[in-house]
């Protein structure tokens, strides 16, 4: 009885994911293992070895961006959860505010702000300093990732922090735990689920982005997303594009798997230990 | 109470946004139509064109699609989301959609004729075809004028900022000049980027000699350390804002940039440059062929062609536009250079797949 109700409740999503997730994934796999004429071929898979460098810098850039967002977001989310309700509401709105504008527009604006003659360099020049080159550097691309995805790190961490029962902290204090240990043995483990989903939500879009690197990297920094976009849009090589996407998906799956293992070990378990 | 007030304010805002386009007066009527636009009321027409490639009613211009619907009673499905000739080709080739009018570029028309993806255009149903100037008839991709009706003509040149560049340059070599290190922009797509090196080296842009393509690729590799960025439409912001000194781009777009930044200058390199024609064609998959002819004829109406030419800033192949005293670019030395200033030009041809994939491989090495 219960089983059939469950199946019924799941039906809409099952249909949705079959059409929009499973079938497209299948098409990607088919393209990755065929050539332009549609015959089975390993050509695209073998061509992947030329793109190791792109995968590597994509991973590196998005890892750095994820770490930076975490360093900014974690203390902020913690401090915010300790303020009164009204401040929390206003601050949360300020965090969300930039997300009301499209990511493409925000990134395009940053391209203009950071450009050679942009506002920042004009400010530097009026102060008598030499203008700096921002665009086309790894720093600009990582900055773009951090700027665009920071809210996705703050939100889940803040949510777990806000729900955390303060009496646990009081109890720990009563039992003689010092400040650092309260954080290490209580707050950190309890906030881990938020951190994990924050990391996932920042890392995944960062590792696959092409727009940010295209605009802020001046078309000179080729992440894996750029490479895939180029195969699809300019070179009309859907097969190689699909093969690259497939590897990217596997990469993301593996990193999520590792993250989740990490979460299981330090989540609830961490508290008991 | 407070909640109700905010709810009302929110509703009012949404309503205001929704009502805004309606309250603006639209420019959607063409006077003095020459053709006959009756008889197909209630049918639909599927047009596929490039983004921002038709006068669309913004800033008081004529809304061509609305005007066509009003004049004919035909409902137009207008798709301008296709980013490139290659993407358009892929969409049509897949057979997933039927399109009545497309606007491919020269080399793509050549390929589509070769692959029998286009049907013949019946010029007897397009009386306004008489306005197409002779120099745009019998072009290499359609020597008998059977498949295409020219819409726009463009040439590539070099845009530079006169406050950042010494003297008056006249050659592609400025894109390799170390003096402007980190101030040079380059094309972000392979064919255009290769052509800059090919012209400099005095090559034919349609050559099929792999050694020549290698030499051009070598030239682009040499340029790599001194360019600031590879761009397509980002070129507008970068040149308008004085962020870079020199960039190759399309002449019509230079005129748009010049209206924002007066320091920008333009020249056609002495070694020669690329010319392109975008033409209206009817794919084999077209369902409303009569309406497609009607649409092409409408696009060639004097008033419509003039509005499009003013809006797009590209050169027009339409004699009624070029000779119109009211046309703001009449005799413009960049769009319509006289014989003494006309650059040497080459069209891109559709290269055979082997050469295409060869230079695409070279391009991968250059950009990655």
Image: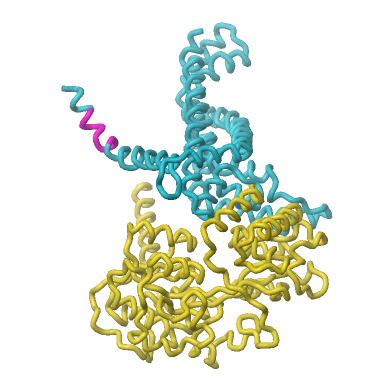
Residue in the picture at 66% in, 54% down: A113
Direction from residue B165 to residue B197 in the image, left or right:
left
Q: Return the residue nearer the eye: B123 or A197.
A: B123
Stretch of the chain drawn in magenta: A7-14
**Residue B75 is at least partly visible in this image:** yes
Residue B169 coordinates in the image, percent (x, y): 78, 73
Magenta stretch: includes residue A10: yes
Colour chosen for chain B: yellow
Residue B208 coordinates in the image, percent (x, y): 60, 62
Residue B295 coordinates in the image, percent (x, y): 36, 78
Q: Is residue B100 above or below residue A33?
A: below
Q: How is the image coloured?
A: by chain
Chain coloured cyan: A
Residue in the picture at 33% in, 85% down: B125
Direction from residue A268 to residue B351 in the image, left or right:
right
Q: Quadrant of residue B73?
A: bottom left
- Which residue lies most toward the left here? A1
Q: Return the residue nearer the eye: A226 or A78.
A: A226
**Residue A65 is at least partly visible in this image:** no
Direction from residue B69 to residue B112 in the image, left or right:
right
Residue in the picture at 66% in, 59% down: B213
Q: Count every numbered label the image shows and give the total.
A: 0
Q: Is residue B3 above or below residue B90?
A: above
Q: Is residue B231 above or below residue A199?
A: below
Q: Quadrant of residue B180?
A: bottom right
Q: Is residue A169 above or below residue A61?
A: above
């Amino acid at each position: 009885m219960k089983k059939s109700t469950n199946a019924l409740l799941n039906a809409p999503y099952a249909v949705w994911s079959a059409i929009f997730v499973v079938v497209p994934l299948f098409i990607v796999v088919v393209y990755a293992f065929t050539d332009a004429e549609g015959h089975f071929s390993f050509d695209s898979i073998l061509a992947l070895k030329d793109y190791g460098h792109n995968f590597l810098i994509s991973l590196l850039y998005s890892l750095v961006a994820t770490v930076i967002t975490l360093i900014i977001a974690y203390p902020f989310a913690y401090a915010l959860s300790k303020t009164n309700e009204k401040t929390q509401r206003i601050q949360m709105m300020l965090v969300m505010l930039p997300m009301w504008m499209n990511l493409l527009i925000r990134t395009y604006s940053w391209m203009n702000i950071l450009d050679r003659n942009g506002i920042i360099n004009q400010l530097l020049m009026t102060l008598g300093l030499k203008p700096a080159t921002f665009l086309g550097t790894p720093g600009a691309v990582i900055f773009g990732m951090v700027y665009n995805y920071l809210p996705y790190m703050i939100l889940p961490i803040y949510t777990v922090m806000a729900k955390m029962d303060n009496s646990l902290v009081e109890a720990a204090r009563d039992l003689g735990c010092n400040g650092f240990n309260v954080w290490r043995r209580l707050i950190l483990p309890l906030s881990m689920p938020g951190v994990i989903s924050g990391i996932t939500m920042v890392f995944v879009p960062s590792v696959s982005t092409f727009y940010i690197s295209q605009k802020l990297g001046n078309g000179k920094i080729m992440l894996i997303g750029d490479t895939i976009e180029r195969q699809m849009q300019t070179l009309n090589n859907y097969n190689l594009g699909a093969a690259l996407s497939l590897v990217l998906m596997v990469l993301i799956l593996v990193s999520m798997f590792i993250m989740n293992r990490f979460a299981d070990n330090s989540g609830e378990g961490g508290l008991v230990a | 109470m407070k909640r109700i007030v905010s709810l009302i304010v929110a509703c009012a805002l949404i309503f205001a946004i929704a009502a805004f386009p309606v309250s603006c007066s639209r420019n959607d009527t063409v006077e003095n139509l020459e053709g006959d636009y009756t008889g197909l009321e209630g049918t639909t027409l599927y047009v596929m064109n490039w983004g921002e490639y038709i006068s669309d009613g913004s800033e008081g211009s004529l809304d061509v699609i609305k005007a066509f619907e009003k004049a004919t009673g035909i409902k137009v499905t207008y798709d301008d989301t296709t980013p490139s000739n290659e993407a358009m080709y892929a969409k049509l080739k897949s057979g997933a959609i039927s399109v009545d009018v497309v606007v491919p570029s020269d080399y793509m028309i050549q390929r589509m004729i070769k692959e029998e993806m286009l049907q013949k255009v019946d010029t007897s149903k397009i009386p306004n075809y008489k306005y197409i100037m002779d120099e745009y008839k019998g072009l290499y991709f359609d020597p008998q004028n059977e498949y295409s009706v020219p819409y726009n003509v463009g040439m590539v040149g070099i845009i530079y900022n006169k406050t950042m560049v010494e003297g008056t340059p006249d050659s592609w070599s400025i894109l390799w000049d170390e003096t402007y290190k980190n101030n040079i922009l380059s094309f972000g797509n392979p064919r255009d980027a290769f052509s800059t090196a090919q012209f400099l080296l005095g090559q034919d842009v349609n050559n099929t000699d792999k050694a020549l393509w290698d030499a051009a690729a070598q030239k682009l590799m040499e340029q790599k350390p001194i360019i600031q960025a590879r761009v397509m439409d980002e070129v507008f912001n970068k040149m308008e804002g004085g962020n870079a000194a020199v960039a190759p781009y399309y002449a019509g777009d230079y005129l748009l940039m010049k209206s924002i930044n007066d320091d920008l200058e333009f020249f056609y390199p002495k070694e020669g440059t690329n010319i392109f024609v975008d033409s209206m064609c009817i794919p084999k998959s077209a369902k409303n062929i009569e309406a497609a002819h009607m649409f092409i004829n409408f696009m060639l109406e004097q008033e419509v062609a003039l509005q499009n030419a003013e809006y797009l800033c590209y050169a027009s192949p339409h004699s009624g536009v070029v000779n119109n005293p009211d046309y703001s670019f009449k005799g413009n030395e960049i769009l319509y250079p006289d014989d003494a200033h006309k650059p040497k030009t080459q069209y891109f041809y559709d290269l055979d797949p082997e050469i295409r994939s060869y230079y695409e491989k070279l391009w991968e090495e250059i950009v990655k």
